[in-house]
Amino acid sequence: MGKEQATSIFSGMQERYPNRKLIPFAKRADNDDTACFEVGKKNKIQLIHDFATEGFEQRGEFEDLWEWVKSAVETMVEYNREEEIV
């Protein structure tokens, strides 16, 4: 995610989810799922479905960055196989 996109998503999430301190760092290209750090949650990664109604945005939580990376790579492989992308 580039600087401008990250800044835009960060600002938007502050407005949409004012009770959370989310710091986005990765976003899926095919939907609004966004991986975020959250202030006060230590090393855990929050998977947020951006633009969802407040209170319904949480899609998942990973124990640490490596657990998220593993899941992201597995999701990428699955997506590319389904789309027949080599």
Image (cartoon, rainbow, N blue to C red):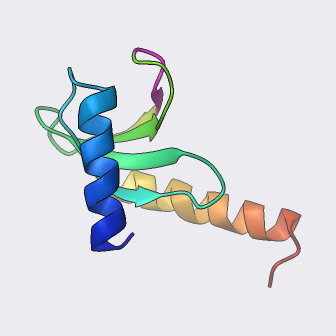
Quarter of the image with the C terminus in it: bottom right
Quarter of the image with the N terminus in it: bottom left
**Closer to the camera in the image, 85 or 13:** 13
Image coordinates of residue 38 in percent, x first then y, are 21, 38
Span highlighted in magenta in the image: 55-59
Quarter occupied by residue 43: top left
Report whether 26 appears left or right of 12. Answer: right
Q: Residue at position x 27%, y 71% from top? A: 3
Up-down relation of residue 77 to residue 48 (above or below): below
Up-down relation of residue 70 to residue 62 (above or below): below
Image coordinates of residue 68 in percent, x first then y, are 43, 53
**Closer to the camera in the image, 21 or 4:** 4
Q: Residue at position x 41%, y 52% from top? A: 67
Report whether 24 appears left or right of 48. Answer: left
Q: Residue at position x 25%, y 59% from top? A: 7
The main secondary structure of the magenta stretch is loop
Q: Residue at position x 11%, y 32% from top? A: 40
Quarter occupied by residue 76: bottom right
